[in-house]
Amino acid sequence: MKRNFFALLLAFCLLLLPCGIFPQTAAQAATEGVAECVVEVTSRRFLHEKNAEERLPMASTTKILTAIVVIEDCDLEEVVSIPQEAEGTEGSSVYLKAGEEYTVRDLLYGLMLRSGNDCAVTLALHHSESIDAFAKVMTARAGEMGAEHSQFLNPHGLPAREHYTTARDLALIAAYAMQNSTFREIVGCPYYAPRGWKNKNKMLTCYEGATGVKTGFTTAAGRCLVTSAVRNGMPVVSVLLNCPDTYARTCALLDDVYSRYQMIPLLDASQPFRGYAVKRGFAYPLTKEELAEIRIDGVSAMPLPETTGEVAGQVLIYLGNRLLFSENLYIM
């Protein structure tokens, strides 16, 4: 009788404890991606990471890099004749036929809205004349974006042994791409009327503030999703690799980030700082607790110059002891 009483008492006490002290349940873990990442676009501050440096296949999210390389390097109004190599490309397709003519812009919409692997092959051959050559450009360009742990062997993301990225790398690639207005216009388009192509990305309609980016799926990669969103002036990109329910998990991640962080203006380029001019403003995503740790210092140069426009010192912005930003101060 005494043993039963203590068992009941223990069970009652456990019910009163906050659920956050218990390890994650299997059911909770099953809703998450194998790798996850959320980054604020302008500062490149990572706001959430899980296995973010693990090398994984990424399926059609590969096409984010394909698209931005083509946008930066090609004339979007140039007319392209569809090559024989593109017709009948495996996987998702817009059913291009050899000899048909499309503009580069058309093909980019087919690539990003309909995930056309045939569009990817056509664009790669148009850009570099071979898939291998284009893949080398992709890997090099990704490195320039800060994605140094990725390797690309094709422009579409169909399975290849050494074709991989990390959640962190893919977030950096997508953040870079989302700062291009043409890219944003394409991935944010719900319907491309000239060709009758509807965007497959459901995030555009199911999440307030969503602005893109790309879905992906192969058996090897699982379900993948890269999403961009803007709320209260804070643009973010989330990445999920191999996640059973990418849409629900992405909504949960974005809601969490937007509930904890705000984009805080810390320096206004249109206003003098302590009597000096600055040429660059600065804003940074911060929690309420972090905002209290911000310190802004002005450092004067010696000797002080007297000519308008000359450097008079620096403004330094710290989060705790970590330097976030520095900018010259100029004589007004």
Image (cartoon, grey):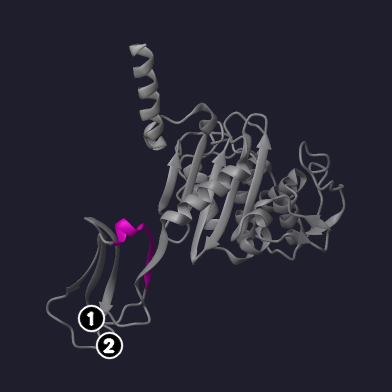
Q: Which mark is residue 332?
A: 2
Kindly tell me whether residue 172 is visible in this rendering: no
**Three-letter amino acid code at disc 2?**
Met
Looking at the rendering, in which quadrant would you find the C terminus?
Answer: bottom left
Q: Nearer the viewer, mark 2 or mark 1?
A: 1
Q: Give the image location of residue 324, x and y in percent.
A: 30, 60
Q: Residue at x 62, y 62 (%)?
A: 184
Indicate whether residue 91 is drawn in magenta: no
Q: Quadrant of residue 287?
A: bottom left
Residue assigned mark 1: 274
Indicate whether residue 282 is drawn in magenta: yes
Kindly tell me whether residue 295 is visible in this rendering: yes
Secondary structure at numbered mark 1: loop
Q: Give the image location of residue 111, x and y in percent.
A: 72, 51
Q: Give the image location of residue 213, x and y in percent.
A: 62, 53
Pick the residue in front: 309 or 56.
56
Q: Residue at x 64, y 56 (%)?
A: 70
